[in-house]
Amino acid sequence: MLKPLLYLLFICVASPFISAQHIKIDKKALSFLTSQKNVNIVFVQDSLLMIDDVYEMEFIQKIRTKINRQASTVEASKWISEYNINKIKTWPEIFTNQLNAKLSDSKNAPNFEMNNTEATYTMKVVPTWMYFGYDAGIIDRPAKVTLQIYFYETKKPETIIYATEISRAMAKYNKQKGDGEGAGPSLYRMRKAYELAAYKLAKSLQRLVD
């Protein structure tokens, strides 16, 4: 009797997390993907929110102040520069590469190419929430990211064919593989969250393109 009760308790506790991880895919709305060789992918960063609805610029200023106090202004500027490179280049590339890698064995999957304006269709990725996690010695937390996904014809960006969300994708924490703290929050931890988000999207799209 105890085991069934423990199982039910686990389901009740875990169910909000499981629900948050589900990515809704409409096979009919996205059926065009199976006939495409390439799909454009763009990342839009202008609506990014950070940690409990704190806007990005406020978050960056807090990190700058913290690193200035604990290390130096040079280290603060270095972290912010690296953050911007990751946001604009590294994380989008990781997402795109992981998405294509996971879909590579699917029979009818298109190849997603960043900024390919010649493609008939576009997938727009909009980060709306990020959590960098932390390493406090005994206690640590992985990074998480929420991404809004929009599909539309490249020449008709105002007409959304389908929209969905990757909610709070969370990678596993591993201090031995770069997840520990540096001068500022670990950018590598967030990279892993983007990678997992792409993996989860690919898993959902496989139901359509396999």
Image (spheres, rainbow, N blue to C red):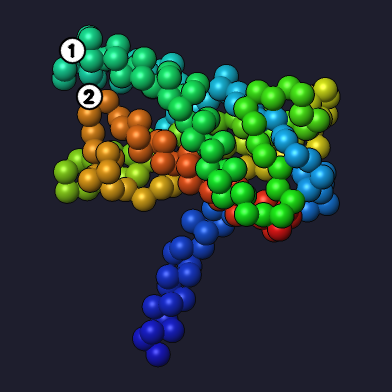
The residue that disc 2 covers is: 183
The answer to whether any part of residue 188 appears in the image is yes
Which residue type does callout 2 highlight? Answer: Ala
- Sequence-wise, the earlier of marks 1 and 2 is 1
Q: Position of residue 130 (x, y in %)?
A: 45, 34
Task: Identify the residue at horizontal 48%, vertical 67% (top origin).
Answer: 12
Q: Which residue is mark 1?
A: 72
Q: Is residue 195 above or below residue 44?
A: below
The quadrant of the image that shows the N terminus is: bottom left
Q: Position of residue 90 (x, y in %)?
A: 46, 27
Give me the C-alpha separation between circle 1 and circle 2: 9 Å
Q: Disc count in the image?
A: 2
In this rendering, would 31 be left or right of 129?
right
Q: Position of residue 196 (x, y in %)?
A: 48, 46
Which element type, helix, strand or loop, lies under badge 1? Answer: loop
Indicate which disc residue 115 carries.
Answer: none
Q: Residue at x 27, y 39 (%)?
A: 178
Task: Identify the element where label 2 is drawn.
Answer: loop
Closest to the observer, 1 or 33: 33
